[in-house]
Amino acid sequence: MNRFRPDFSDDPAVELNGVSLRYDTADDVLSDINIRLKPGSFTFLTGASGAGKSSLLKLLYLALAPTAGDIRLFGQRTGMLKRKQLSAIRRRIGVVFQDFRLLEHLTAFENVALPLRVAGQKEAAYRTEVVDLLRWVGLGERLNARPPQLSGGEQQRVAIARALINKPDLLIADEPTGNVDPDMARRIFRLFQELNRRLDTTIIIATHDMHIIREFESPVLRLQHGILVEDVEFQGA
Ligand SMILES: Nc1ncnc2c1ncn2[C@@H]1O[C@H](COP(=O)(O)OP(=O)(O)OP(=O)(O)O)[C@@H](O)[C@H]1O
């Protein structure tokens, strides 16, 4: 018997339907959020401090589960998945944080290689890939430096390389340029843009930086007290 096989190629990479989130407090921190991000899209997420940006991103990288509504990643409804399937989805997601979260006793090379080492790969198999990625972020000369010897912008670029080593389909960045100067911020956003254009990686970045948002002309989601509001001023193509 021929089984019907639906074509999922047009599934959004990220889809949130009626998603709400409440911590152990009385009120919703996120309320009835509806989002669809196409594969290969580049989206900014903005809003005042406390509006719920980090909480929304945590839902997307599966660090939290919604109190109501459903989240689909790559066409799969995450609330229905078993632990193994969730791990497989997590491997398709790269995350970059404002505070880098590098291991201080490891070199730049070792930090980037860590996800592969943990997955049981041998250095001979991944060495070239890790070096190429560190070169791409402009750190080809700093492979053996440890985080305390690197500037904030250099540490963030190591963190970006680490988030990309598994070739994620979705890259989530939470205020990735909050701890670097404006020139470095622009450089980092250009790396994200190049990644999006060259590899079609779906990217969502939370940022307060309106200069960057204006300059990059990508669609903007804006949160206000946990509610998504239209952002006519910054809506790009
Ligand atoms: N673990 C938690 N337990 C209870 N409340 C929380 C928790 N994490 C965040 N909150 C609350 O949820 C709301 C949204 O916080 P969130 O960190 O998502 O906002 P944000 O927009 O990312 O803010 P910022 O720009 O300052 O990082 C805030 O009122 C915050 O105090």
Image (cartoon, grey):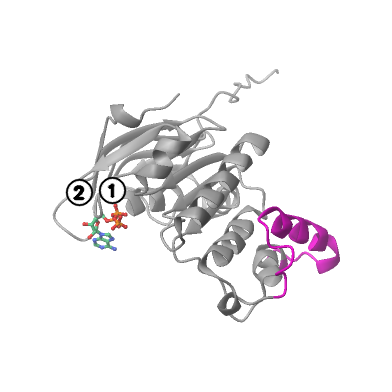
Taking the image in four quarters, ligand 1 sits in the one at bottom left
Asked whether residue 64 is drawn in magenta, I would say no
Q: Mark 2 sits on what residue?
A: 28
Question: Residue extending furthest left?
Answer: 26
Asked whether residue 136 is drawn in magenta, I would say yes
Q: Report the quarter where the C terminus lies.
A: top left
Eye-nearest disc, 1 or 2: 2
Tell me which amino acid carries mark 2.
Asp
Q: Position of residue 207 (x, y in %)?
A: 38, 49
| For residue 144, above or below residue 69 | below
Q: Mark 1 sits on what residue?
A: 67
Depth check: give the residue in front, 78 or 19: 19
Label 1, residues with CA under 10 Å away: few <14, some 14-19, many ≥20: some
N-term mark: 1 or 2: 2
Residue at 67%, 53% (x, y): give it. Answer: 166
Answer with left or right where residue 198 lies relative to residue 179. right
Tell me which amino acid carries mark 1.
Thr
